[in-house]
Image (cartoon, rainbow, N blue to C red):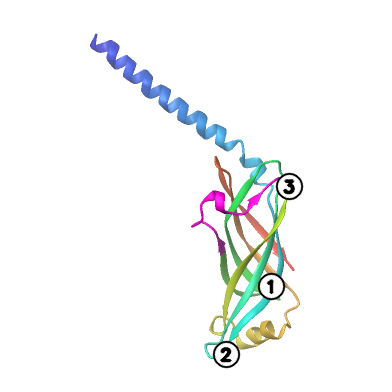
């Protein structure tokens, strides 16, 4: 009788691992569709300048498109912002602290602009570049980084590069 109980326990454990494997496999079926996400740097605008602390707030807008059939949300976009090829700094759009039902939902074929405040400090870049940004003398902004897309079953990170 003792051998039969051990066998049942081993079969139950094996069944549990098998069930967990099926769940992981099922979740990974979304990954190819999530990889289709498209990110474009739409615009960068100066919103506020603090001349005392030499800090400017820039509004960075990314246009995120879902060309796939799978609905997803975007919890994070981590990026480095460049102005005329010069690094201005790093920024992050994040809705990780908001539950999935409260985030922007990307249905099939939908494009949604996601805005983020980027803090530019004169101490982090040379003063010529800082003044060029404030005066609107930057010909092209670009961003590179990663976007995280998420469904209720799966989450992926995709690298991107884009410019205005």
Secondary element at tag 1: strand
Within the magenta stretch, is there residue 160? no
Q: CA distance from mark 3 to mark 2?
A: 43 Å
Q: Helix, strand or loop at disc 3?
A: loop
Q: Which residue is mark 1?
A: 44
> Could you say where residue 99 lies in the image, as x and y percent from the top left?
51, 52
Residue 63 in the image: above or below residue 67? below
Front residue of 100 and 36: 100
- Span shown in magenta: 93-108
Give whichever of discs 3 and 2 has the lower sequence position.
2
In the rendered image, the vertical position of residue 13 relative to residue 1, given as above or below? below
Callouts 3 and 2 close, C-beta under 8 Å: no
Vertical position of residue 33 compared to residue 93: above or below? above
- Quadrant of the rendered image containing residue 78: bottom right
In the picture, the disc for residue 20 is none
Q: Is residue 117 left or right of residue 69?
A: left
Q: Work out which quarter of the rendered image holds the N terminus and state it.
A: top left
Q: Residue 38 location in percent, x, y?
A: 70, 53
Q: Earlier in the sequence, mark 2 or mark 1?
A: 1
Give the residue displayed 74% in from the left and 48% down from the top.
109
Q: Earlier in the sequence, mark 1 or mark 3?
A: 1
- Residue 41 position, x and y percent, is 70, 64
> Mark 2 touching mark 1, by CB under 8 A?
no
Question: Looking at the image, which residue sits at the far front?
Answer: 102
SS for dot 2:
loop
The quadrant of the image that shows the C terminus is: bottom right
Q: Find residue 110 and report its horizontal and vertical position in percent.
A: 72, 51
Q: Residues within 10 Å of mark 3 (few under 14, many from 20)?
A: some
Q: Which residue is mark 3?
A: 67
Q: Which residue is mark 2?
A: 51
Q: Residue at x 55, y 42 (%)?
A: 152
Spatial CA span between label 1 and label 3 = 24 Å
């Amino acid at each position: 009788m003792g051998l039969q109980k051990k066998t049942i326990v081993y079969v139950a454990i094996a069944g549990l691992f098998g069930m967990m494997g099926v769940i992981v496999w099922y979740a990974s079926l979304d990954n190819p569709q999530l990889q289709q996400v498209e990110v474009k740097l739409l615009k960068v605008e100066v919103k506020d300048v603090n001349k005392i602390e030499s800090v400017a707030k820039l509004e960075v807008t990314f246009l995120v498109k879902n060309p796939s059939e799978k609905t997803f949300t975007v919890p994070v976009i981590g990026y480095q912002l460049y102005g005329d090829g010069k690094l201005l700094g790093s920024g992050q759009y994040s809705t990780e602290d908001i539950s999935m039902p409260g985030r922007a939902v990307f249905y099939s074929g939908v494009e949604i602009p996601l805005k983020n405040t980027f803090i530019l400090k004169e101490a982090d870049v040379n003063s010529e570049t800082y003044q060029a940004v404030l005066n609107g003398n930057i010909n092209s902004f670009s961003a590179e980084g990663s976007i995280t897309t998420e469904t209720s079953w799966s989450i992926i990170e995709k690298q991107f590069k884009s410019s205005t």
